[in-house]
Amino acid sequence: MHQPRTTQIMAHRGASKAERPNTVAAFARAREMGSHAVELDVRQCRSGELVVHHDPQLADGRIIAQLSKDQLPSFIPTLDEVLDACGEMWVNVEIKNHRTEPDFDTDDHRTDAVIDVLRRRVARHGDPRRYLLSCFRRATVDHAVKKWPELPTAWLTISVSNADELARDLKDSGHVAVHPEVGQVSQQMIDTFHRHGLAVNTWTCDDPANMATLIDWGIDGICTNVPDVISCSASSRWRIVSVFVSSMKSPSSW
């Protein structure tokens, strides 16, 4: 058993078991439940607004990138509306940008638009380290680092074949974290990334027993659909405290 580390409770698309995922209500509920952080998905509609939605299309099959904001259902919020609802919670902004999807953005204009929103908010409210930008497309997070080096970035991945090699590469590229799928996570993997000064935030875990194991292993963040359940699980094993900007001296301290 490892010495306990701070573990963040990250509400996946908000409190997505209790409310419709990726809605203002879901993020407000996560805040009420005491989540330290939230994860959200960003796309862009035809009229240019950044909106929070997981899939590239609506339930009726219409493509979000081909619709204006006023053609979208009212429950789909803008990025700014969600960030307002999140209050002081730490926010993991996942940019949806996969080459197989109809809104694939090879030039990362969507990423630039997200960074513009975050820059504007940081200019008003403080430190860029209250946000984390993540994506499954490695080129997208690499682009973000070059665009705004002070903004923490993380690569999302399903599998990790060589943790040491990947950790060196991510660190050298300026990223602060890796986000592996929960079924691929091991204590050895976490230890390897920690040795290189990288955080490990996993997705998506709703089982209290698995949560407790991950906490034992020293995981930095657990993305979950049930942040109220993980609060109970975490408090029964370790004292879990949030990681806010005030405790972040630098990205390497994660």
Image (cartoon, rainbow, N blue to C red):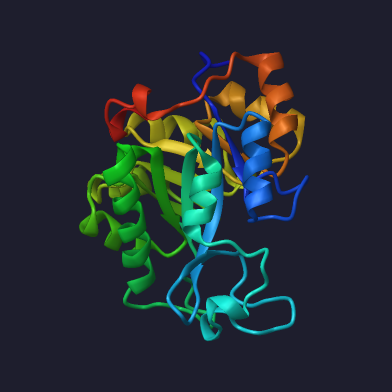
**In which quadrant of the rendered image does the N terminus lie?**
top right
Q: Quadrant of residue 206?
A: top right
Quadrant of res 143: bottom left
Whether residue 248 is visible, yes or no, is: yes
Residue 126: horizontal and vertical position, in percent? 30, 37
Compared across the picture, whether 66 is left or right of 25 comes to left
Could you tell me which residue is drawn at 33 percent across and 44 percent down? 152
**Screen quadrant of the C terminus:** top left
**Depth check, front residue: 219 or 62:** 62
Q: Position of residue 17 (x, y in %)?
A: 77, 47
Above or below, 28 against 51 in this view is: above
**Foreground pick, 37 / 104:** 37
Q: Is residue 118 left or right of residue 41?
A: left
Residue at horizontal 40%, vertical 52%? 133
Q: Is residue 168 visible?
A: no
Q: Residue at x 47, y 61 (%)?
A: 136
Q: Nearer the viewer, residue 106 or 214?
A: 106
Q: Residue at x 60, y 83 (%)?
A: 63
Residue 134 image position (x, y, % from top left): 43, 54
Q: Position of residue 242 (x, y in %)?
A: 51, 25
Tell me if 196 is positioned left or right of 179 in this view: left
Q: Is residue 45 above or below residue 164?
A: below
Badge count: 0
Relative height, residue 108 to residue 68 (above, below): above
